[in-house]
Image (spheres, grey):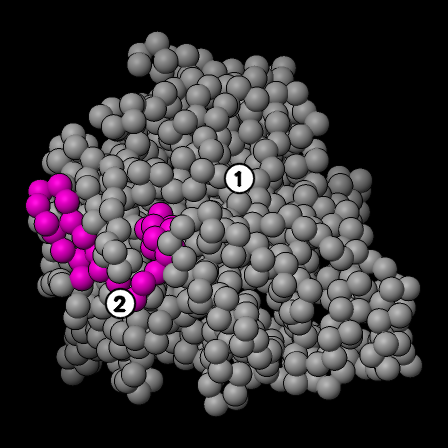
Amino acid sequence: MALTTDQEQRKRRRKSSFSPWIMGFGRVAFTVAITMIGLLFITFIIGRVMPIDPVLSIVGESASKSTYDEAYRQLGLDKPIIVQFFIFLWDVVRGDFGESLLTARPVLDDLIRVFPATLELATVGTIIGVGLGVPLGVIAAVKQGTWIDHIARVVALIGYSMPVFWIGLIGLLVFYGKLGWISGPGRLDIFYVDIIPTVTGMILIDSLLAGDTSVFWNAVSHIILPAGLLAYYSLAYISRMTRSFMLEQLDQEYITTARVKGLSEHAVVWRHALGNVKVPLITVIALSYAGLLEGSVLTETIFSWPGIGLYITTALLSADMNAVLGGTVVVGLVFVCLNIFSDLLYKFFDPRAK
Amino acid sequence: MNTFKSLMLGVAAVAITATAPAAFAATPDNILVIANRIDDITTLDPAQSFEFAGGDLSRNIYGKLVNFDPTDLSKGYQPDLAESWTVSEDGKTITFKMRAGVKFHSGNPVTAADAVYSLQRAVKLNKTPAFILTQFGFSAENADQTIKQIDDMTFSITTDAKYATSFVLNCLTATIGGIVDSKTVMSHEKDGDMGNNWLKTNTAGSGAYKLVNWKPNESYSLIVNKDFYQGAPKIERVIVRHIQESATQRLLLEKGDIDIARNLNPQDVAGAGSKDGISILSDLRGRLMYISMNQKDPNLAKPKVVEALKYLIDYKGMQDSFLKGQYTIHQAFLPRTYLGEIADKPYSLNIEKAKALLKEAGVEAGFELKINVREAQERIEIAQSLQNTFAKANIKITLQVGTGKATLGVYRAREHQIYVGAWGPDYPDPNTNAGTFAFNPDNSDEAKATGLLAWRNSWALPEMSKATKAAVQESDRDARAKMYEALQREHQKRAPFAVMFQKIEQTGIRSNVKGLNTGGAITQVSYWPITK
């Protein structure tokens, strides 16, 4: 009898260990769908109540009445707003974001062109930011209250508080204008443009795929300053957060135990303490990465970087709502994906989450 | 190309690794690199394009029936794809003879059929700039009868009334007058759109350059048309990059990575202009700054008051301070470089004279006025300067700053007292401004002629309206120019408009670049006469 119960229980456990996965997946998909629809709806409504006339931005002020009316009908603005929203939603589900007013091309094509530029910049920026920010935070925590800590604090504060456009311009002036160490604005020198085939849209990767190192190095010399700038900004945030997480850990009893056991300080700090900081740190890094992926409008403007931040802003200012909504979907998806991804990483790193 | 590539590779390597200042990197002699704001381009179709950067692109790709010569804009329109033309006795029909031996980029010959197709197409598509043609009575319904092919190389257009030939031809120099390759365009027609969708991102012209590609908000690049009928240009490739920031454009120019910077702000003009190897080209543009006085206001309706206010504007002070390098004093309603332009500047700041005039008008004790101005930096500064100088003659000003839309709404409803306005001409003929500054056939509120600046200011000018109408029909170009000169002098004296400034555009260029013409107020940039 006892045996059967045990078997049943085991069976039930096996069954229930399978269904949570489906349940989990279903829940995630449902959340994503609701989030995206909500996001689209709000953006859509804001776009419609904005005091910019999308028709005027197509036809201009000197257009005749008949020209205006025709464009008005073509945009479907004569229909009720809720109908407009559902038409739009149905198109999006089918992968059709409509055509951008500004570029006269399908929004999807535009996004495929501009998003990789931002992705490339944000990824390089985050790698540099994490590579420098985490060690800086750890050292600042270990050497709390010393001059190293103070310097780390000042560095972070400057990164936080300096306006990006100012550092960007000064950086360009010094490293490009005066010293000539790097290339100027844009993703490539004009003479390298369109040499390699576009695969991913990220020039660093595409040039390596094509085996063209000259293009690769040119792209590196273009990306290093704007990426460094974004890195500095995220470094400020990451290092401060790392420091406070680490301080909390270093106070814990298990650290004292480890030290008493005679473990080397190196192992205590980098393996034990940092090991336990990993999980909250992942959230911080993911959030900062997502922030960069939204596209930094100022950085993209100064460095003439044709990314998604600049694309959405330009579109917004000219009431190009298809482009704005398309861009919003991408940014929304980025946030959702990074969230899911960091959840998965938790499960991987944190035994309790299993 | 190999040596060139390895050279560039060397330069790039030096730029990355060198710790010493990198050598000055000039662009190759056969390539012209330009920094410009090109995010206003929304279509390349000449029947639809109505923006600045799009006009620049179009001018270098599409030939027109008549066109301005970049080496001398003051000659007015010159034969381009049309070799000659004759005008019928009644002045309504112009018959064009096409130039023989000209080819489109596709290799197709340019014929009368293409010209007829292009003009009919522009009228039938009825996009934004279509009014430039439809003001002559062309419509989608009558285009097949009014724009007619006669034989392979001749065709005629018939307007609904007698218009000055120079009026019609000036309008044909606008971007909408670009002649498209009818065979190529028709082969890309979809759902009866006359190739509109295809021409948004492709071109089918016969001009000096062919389009290689256009990446919105990023760049466009052109390659030489070796068969250009005026001879192949020296510059083989033109690359225009979208660089938003003035400071960035200046850096690129100083480094020699670009040859021309189109959007330098006054500070950067001053900074870059003092460097070796860079010169600054100043060019007049069409935009005017003016103030206007609503004639519904009892004080402003007094001619002496209107005159007094024109003496209370510190033209020079504004030009030399916050408008420096961006606007120059100009006091007539036609921008300089237009047919019939005048350079008379009868007014300057003269407070004593203004006070005397106000006394004659019986308002020397002063009165209060509102100035409506939109929230744009330079216009607010102008309004503040007016507030300052008007106060010296006891006229107390309150500024009403609003959004562009709200301010324009007040203006169109004739509810303002004084309005600080800017006006840009729509097409390269004097009537574009005369027809709004000096034309108001019906001044009643019911007329709702909100498009006419004279109506917006409730200014009835029956005599001048007649003169404006007559100028539109004068077929002799010189006589017509004289009419506009007289009209403007009269306008300067009587109108409740004080035209104050004309826009200037300053372009930074590397000193080795010769022959750049940005088109003045009347047309767009021409790349083909440029050499390095």
- Amino acid of disc 1: Arg
Q: Where's residue A86, x and y in %?
A: 26, 80
In the rendered structure, which disc, 2 or 1, sits on the residue that comes first in sequence? Answer: 2
In-front residue for pair B261/A232: B261
Q: Residues within 10 Å of mark 2 (few under 14, many from 20)?
A: few
- Amino acid of disc 2: Asp
Residue B265 in magenta stretch: no
Q: Residues within 10 Å of mark 1 (few under 14, many from 20)?
A: many
Q: Residue at x 25, y 28 (%)?
A: B229
Q: Residue at x 58, y 57 (%)?
A: B486
Task: Give the vertical position of B410 relative to B43 (above or below).
Answer: below
Q: Where's residue B256, x and y in %?
A: 54, 24
Numbered range of the magenta stretch = B146-173
Which quadrant of the rendered structure holds the C terminus of chain A? bottom left
In-front residue for pair B404/B482: B482
Q: Quadrant of residue B238?
A: top left
Q: Which mark is residue B262?
A: 1
Q: Which mark is residue B160?
A: 2
Q: Residue at x 18, y 73 (%)?
A: A15
Whether residue B486 is visible to the viewer of this picture, yes or no, is yes
Q: Where's residue B517, x and y in %?
A: 48, 34
Q: CA distance from mark 2 to mark 1?
A: 41 Å
Whether residue A296 is visible to the viewer of this picture, yes or no, is no
